[in-house]
Amino acid sequence: LGLSVDEARILAADPALSTFFDDALAAWDDPKGVANWVVNELLGALDDRQVDSLPFGGAALGTLVGLIENATISGRIAKDVLAEMIRHGGDPREIVRQQDLRQLTDPDALAPIIDRLMAAHADKVAQYRAGKTGLAGFFVGQVMRETGGKANPKLVQDLVQQKLG
């Protein structure tokens, strides 16, 4: 499946986790992406709980990974959705819909935010153009904060770079 030895070992060591992974994979066929979320995010969030005590099954986690990979939500938003799933269960699509967590991917909606932030921080724009290129990250962070983390980070980065010149 293209997994690392460590990922495969972790997933195979616990029959319940292995079944959970298989169910997630049946919902979203990306072994590497699903394994990453099971091993790194889910197991890290479980604390002392066991995977078979969760109020959702593997298919829900597979659906969550699909939402990330099709750019409906960002990885950051997905962590919040996962936390909600661990607390209360539920379909990740429904959680995203109810909490209005869809990622902002419309450049025309993001451009005015970037323009306003650049006008408010004209000194940093000048510093960027004078060679302090690390300030692009400042603007990306400001846009992400302004949008409550909903903006597509890659798109924001591209738009900021374009506008900074």
Image: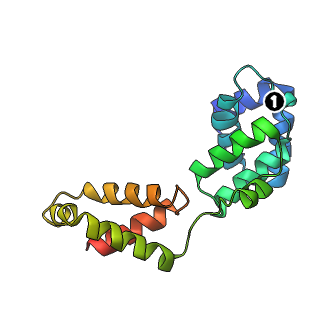
Indicate left or right for 2 with 120 as reference. right
Residue drawn at point x = 81 percent, y = 29 percent: 51
Percent from the top left, x then y, of residue 87?
77, 36
The number of discs equals 1
Picture quadrant of residue 129: bottom left
Relative to 3, residue 100 above or below:
below
The N terminus: image quadrant:
top right
Picture quadrant of residue 82: top right
Between residue 72 and residue 70, name the one nearer to us.
72
Indicate left or right for 40 with 91 as reference. left
Q: Amino acid at mark 1?
A: Val
Indicate left or right for 154 with 89 as reference. left
Percent from the top left, x then y, of residue 19?
87, 36
Indicate left or right for 156 with 23 as reference. left
Percent from the top left, x then y, of residue 16?
86, 29
Picture quadrant of residue 21: top right
Element marked by disc 1: helix
Between residue 154 and residue 33, name the one nearer to us.
154
Between residue 15 and residue 1, name the one nearer to us.
15
Relative to 66, residue 49 above or below:
above
Q: Specify the farthest residue to the bottom.
A: 108
> What residue does disc 1 label?
51
The C terminus: image quadrant:
bottom left
Residue drawn at point x = 66 percent, y = 48 percent: 33
Q: Residues within 10 Å of mark 1 (few under 14, many from 20)?
A: many
Percent from the top left, x then y, of residue 75?
59, 51
Relative to 10, residue 104 above or below:
below
Q: Specify the farthest residue to the left.
A: 130
Residue drawn at point x = 30 percent, y = 60 percent: 136
